[in-house]
Amino acid sequence: MAELTTLESLLEMGFDRNRAEKAVAKTGNQGIEQAMDWLMEHENDPDIDEPYVPPVGNILGGEADSQSTSEQPTLADTAEGTAGGDGTLEDEDGMRKPMTEEERQEQVKRLEELMRVKQAERRERERAEELEKEKQRRRQGQELQQIRQKMQDDEMKKLADQRRREKMEDKLARQRVKEKIARDREERAQKFGGGGGPSAATSSQPVEPSPSSPTSHGPPPTKKEYDESRIQVRLLDGSTITTVFKAQEPLAAVRVYIQMNSNTPEGQDFTLLSPYPRHIYTEMDMEKPLKELGLVPSAVLVVTKK
């Protein structure tokens, strides 16, 4: 009678016959609550409305039901309304009597209330799941923001380290230029100071006549090749900055240095010129080495608005 009651109850509640039969079969005819749970969980299945076809040789209830097939109604018999399928109850003597309309309505009312409770529980469960998904999405967004912030911090740190290295290299380059200038002065003093004066020549060689000029002895000194250039830049506000570049560096390196180390407004375009002889440097000159432009060993450049 459990199978009959479950199926009829589902039909009374308005479920389609195919769905009701499938729910009873899939839950092993364990009662109305299990059948309703199955229907709500599988209501979106693509084959939910297809007729239920039991497996070949399968009878609800297993081996125990196979021994009393003639006494226990099958799902098909229930669907067709046989074997008491008109809605009956058993009394104390085991006799079957039909349910009254009031009893039937009371049973349907209880089942509908049970279904409303199940649906409310399902909605609450789905709401909790959506809330958990939203919390997870927010956590992922915060983690992504932290990763982006860390990448930006690392990039800023890298740029700061690069600028410190450039300043250190610039300082070392200036120091090398100063040392080279000092060595050149010392070499010139040793070269022209020892045999340049007539008195020195007379004292060292009293027999020989004094030379007419220091340049009369030996070949003329060779022109010195400079590999660095000391550049002084006069900015728009009248202040100056000075640094040392390699002779083979392009004029564009001077322009970049001015942009990074001056108070020129960001985005302000400017040109460079030599005051004497006056020469305005073009974009083509920016790729030429300082030596080729005649800015070695030292030069003064002026920044002007473009």
Image (spheres, helix red, strand yellow):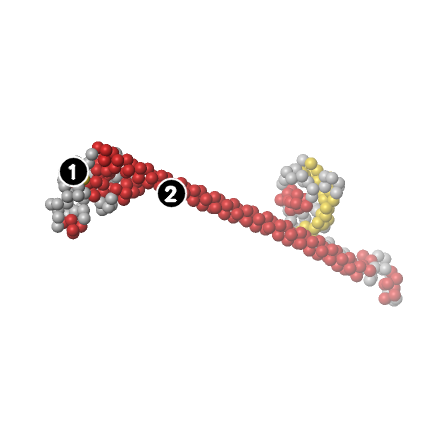
Residue farthest along the top direction in this orientation: 101
Q: Which residue is under mark 1?
A: 97
Dot 2: what SS? helix
Specify the amino acid type for callout 1.
Lys
Q: Does the rendering let one see residue 209?
A: no
At label 2, counting other C-alpha atoms closer than 10 Å, the crowd grade (few under 14, some 14-19, many 20 or more) is few
Quarter of the image for residue 301 reads: top right
Residue at 29% in and 42% down: 37
Quarter of the image for residue 271 reads: top right
Depicted 50 relative to depicted 171: above or below: above
Specify the amino acid type for callout 2.
Arg
Residue at 24% in and 46% down: 30
* Apparent side of residue 288 relative to residue 94 in the rendered image (left or right): right
Q: Does the rendering let one see residue 64?
A: yes
Q: Which residue is under mark 2?
A: 125
Expressed as whole percent of the image width and height from the top left, the position of residue 56 reads 16, 46
Expressed as whole percent of the image width and height from the top left, the position of residue 202 reads 88, 64
Dot 1: what SS? strand
Query: How many tags in the picture?
Result: 2
Expressed as whole percent of the image width and height from the top left, the position of residue 300 reads 73, 45
Q: Nearer the viewer, residue 83 or 110?
A: 110
Q: CA distance from mark 1 to mark 2?
A: 41 Å
Residue at 33% in and 37% down: 116
Depicted 235 relative to depicted 189: above or below: above
